[in-house]
Amino acid sequence: MWQSYPQYGMGWHGDWAWWMPFHGVLWLLVVVAVIAGIVLLVRFLWHGGDRRAAQSGRRSALDILEERYARGELQREEFLQRKKDLS
């Protein structure tokens, strides 16, 4: 008896019919966004909240060049030329 009545606005018979195939894709995108947010939050907290502080432990090419010059591995002209090339 109920099957003879049209169902408007619900299921595959009404205005929502176009939305149903995308329903699963939307939930997949929500799950991926939540997981990505958690990963980014953990990485942010793991590095102490500051990426520059984590990268400051690396030495720049200019620092290495100055150390080599200080140790006497480079002559003054070679040091100045390489310093000019780096800047």
Image (cartoon, grey):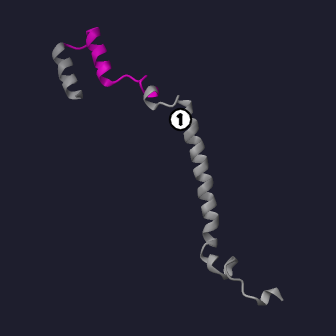
Q: Which quadrant, please, contains the C terminus? A: top left
- The residue under the point 18% across, 13% down is 76
Task: Point out residue 39 in the picture as x, y percentages from the top left corner.
Answer: 58, 41
Q: Is residue 21 above or below residue 84?
A: below
Residue positioned most to the left = 77
Identify which residue, 38 or 5, lies in the foreground: 5
Judge whether residue 74 is colored magenta.
yes
- Which residues are drawn in magenta? 54-75
Between 71 and 22, the one nearer to me in the picture: 22
Looking at the picture, how far across and down is residue 55, in whole percent? 43, 27
The residue at the point 60 percent across, 42 percent down is 38
Quarter placement of the N terminus: bottom right
Residue 84 occupies quadrant: top left
Viewed as shown, does residue 41 lie left or right of 2? left
- Left or right: residue 54 versus residue 86 is right
Q: Magenta stretch: residue 49 in it?
A: no
Which x, y percent locates residue 57?
A: 43, 22
Along the viewing direction, whichever of 70 and 12 lies nearer the viewer: 12
- Disc tally is 1
Callout 1: few (<14), some (14-19), or many (20+) C-alpha neighbours within 10 Å? Answer: few
- What is the three-letter code of the residue carrying label 1? Phe
- In the image: residue 37, left or right of residue 5: left
Q: Residue at x 61, y 47 (%)?
A: 35
* Secondary structure beneath label 1: helix
Q: Position of residue 32 (x, y in %)?
A: 59, 52
**Extreme residue toward the right, this view:** 1
The answer to which of 63 and 47 lies nearer the viewer is: 47
Q: Quadrant of residue 42?
A: top right
Is the residue 79 above or below the residue 36 in the image?
Answer: above
Q: Residue at x 60, y 55 (%)?
A: 30
Q: Which residue is mark 1?
A: 44
